[in-house]
Image: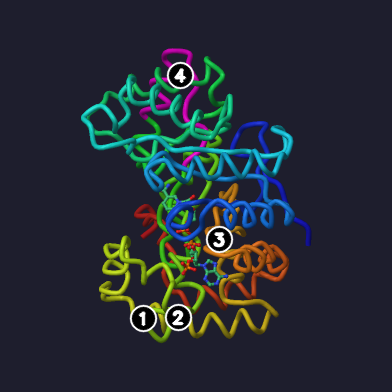
């Protein structure tokens, strides 16, 4: 199957169902050459969306991606690139979503990329100290200057996104087009339940992250932490602790073992099954994959071949193993 392209929410922009991001990997595990090679492999497989953030490797991930884009010499209209603004540095005005940091942050990001404009800019987290109106106006300024085409949020609650839309509608401004939430087999609530009404009402697009739960859903942690894997990296002690010390970790490993059999029955790998499963959800515009090596990119992009094989019977089998789908709201009327 060739890579499907989906409209990003209620917009005219199309993104590949599988995309590619740079968190952890760029700079820490991949310098310029391997990063360029990985991006090239993704692009050849049909990936047209590359995700980044000012926080990734303190801006170096954007610099590496920008250099790779320049070397690869694709047409600017052949790819979509994003950044996320929130953590731009340690200073009091280098973080958050104030008008000052949003505008200075996006300007600095596009310079690190070496691009006149980015396509998407996300607010990387909600900022509890900045009025949403200030952020909505700042993002509209960024778009009016031609520095980005669309803006969105990452890990904002449905209420916060609705508030941004209320402000934008009142002021005749552009509201957030897309959200970037975590979504994988062990983390489902927001995409499958919380955002459902927003997607229907506002046409929110969904660019979902960590589809392999940082590698857990490849099976690579079934028997410990392999040397060189993400959870072995000293800079990411906090991530290793949060995953390995989670009381449900043994249960998750047991589920991965059962899911691996389902993947093999379909002729795929565990990683491919997890990626295709995330991409199958109708509210997901694109699944942002991550990889520390080009071989992983090749394997991951081929997950698209499993999409057609996720029949209702197969999905029911997966659901039987996971047993963690969000419950619908109780209908007290007929109870
Ligand atoms: N908005 C946000 O707050 C946010 C947060 C996190 C991520 N993101 C975005 O989402 C992107 C993807 O997130 P993620 O990197 O956490 O995704 P992920 O799919 O959960 O984890 C990717 C990691 O798993 C391992 N892996 C990937 N494919 C593999 C394969 N086929 N076989 C074995 N191991 C494999 C690699 O790590 P090792 O080889 O090192 O083990 C790789 O770096 C990020 O790059 C970023 O753009 C956004």
Quadrant in which residue 314 is drawn? bottom right
Query: Which sits earlier in the primary sequence, circle 1 or circle 4?
Result: 4
Question: Counting other residues with Cα less than 10 Å from the Cα at mark 3, is it few (<14), some (14-19), or many (20 or more)?
Answer: many
Does ligand 1 reach within 8 Å of label 4's beta carbon?
no
Where 300 falls versus 170 (above or below)? below
Query: Which sits earlier in the primary sequence, circle 2 or circle 3?
Result: 2
| Label 1, label 2: how far apart the Cα atoms are | 6 Å
| Label 3–label 1 contact, CB within 8 A | no
Residue drawn at (60%, 71%), measured in percent from left and top? Answer: 273
Where 105 falls versus 59 (above or below)? above
Q: Which disc is residue 251 wearing?
A: 1
Question: Counting other residues with Cα less than 10 Å from the Cα at mark 2, is it few (<14), some (14-19), or many (20 or more)?
Answer: some
- Between 56 and 196, the one lying in front of the other is 56
Q: List x then y, in percent, for residue 315.
A: 59, 71
**Image side of residue 158 versus residue 241, left or right:** right
| Label 3, label 1: how far apart the Cα atoms are | 20 Å
């Amino acid at each position: 199957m060739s890579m499907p392209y989906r409209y990003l929410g209620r917009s005219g922009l199309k993104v590949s169902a599988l995309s590619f991001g740079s968190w952890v990997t760029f700079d820490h595990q991949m310098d310029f050459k391997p990063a360029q090679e990985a991006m090239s492999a993704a692009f050849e497989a049909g990936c047209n969306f590359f995700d980044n953030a000012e926080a990734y490797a303190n801006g170096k991930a954007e610099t590496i991606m920008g250099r790779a884009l320049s070397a690869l010499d694709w047409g600017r209209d052949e790819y979509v690139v994003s950044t996320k603004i929130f953590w731009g540095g340690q200073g009091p005005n280098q973080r958050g979503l104030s008008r000052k940091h949003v505008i200075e942050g996006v300007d600095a990001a596009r310079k690190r990329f070496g691009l006149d404009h980015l396509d998407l800019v996300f607010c990387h987290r909600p900022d509890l100290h900045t009025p949403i109106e200030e952020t909505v106006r700042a993002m509209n300024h960024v778009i009016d200057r031609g520095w980005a085409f669309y803006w969105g949020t990452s890990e904002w609650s449905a209420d916060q996104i609705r508030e941004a839309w209320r402000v934008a509608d009142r002021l005749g401004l552009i509201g957030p087009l897309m959200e970037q939430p975590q979504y994988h087999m062990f983390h489902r609530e927001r995409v499958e339940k919380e955002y459902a009404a927003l997607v229907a009402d506002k046409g929110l697009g969904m660019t979902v992250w960590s589809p392999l739960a940082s590698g857990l859903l490849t099976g690579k942690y079934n028997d410990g932490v392999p040397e060189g894997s993400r959870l072995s990296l000293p800079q990411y002690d906090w991530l290793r602790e949060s995953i390995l010390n989670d009381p449900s970790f043994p249960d998750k490993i047991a589920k991965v073992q059962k899911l691996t059999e389902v993947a093999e029955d379909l002729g795929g790998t565990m990683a491919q099954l997890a990626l295709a499963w995330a991409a199958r959800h109708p509210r997901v515009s694109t699944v942002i994959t991550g990889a520390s090596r080009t071989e992983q990119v090749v394997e991951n992009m081929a997950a698209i071949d499993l999409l057609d094989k996720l029949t209702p019977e197969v999905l029911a089998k997966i659901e039987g193993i996971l047993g963690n789908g969000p419950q619908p709201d109780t209908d007290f009327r007929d109870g």
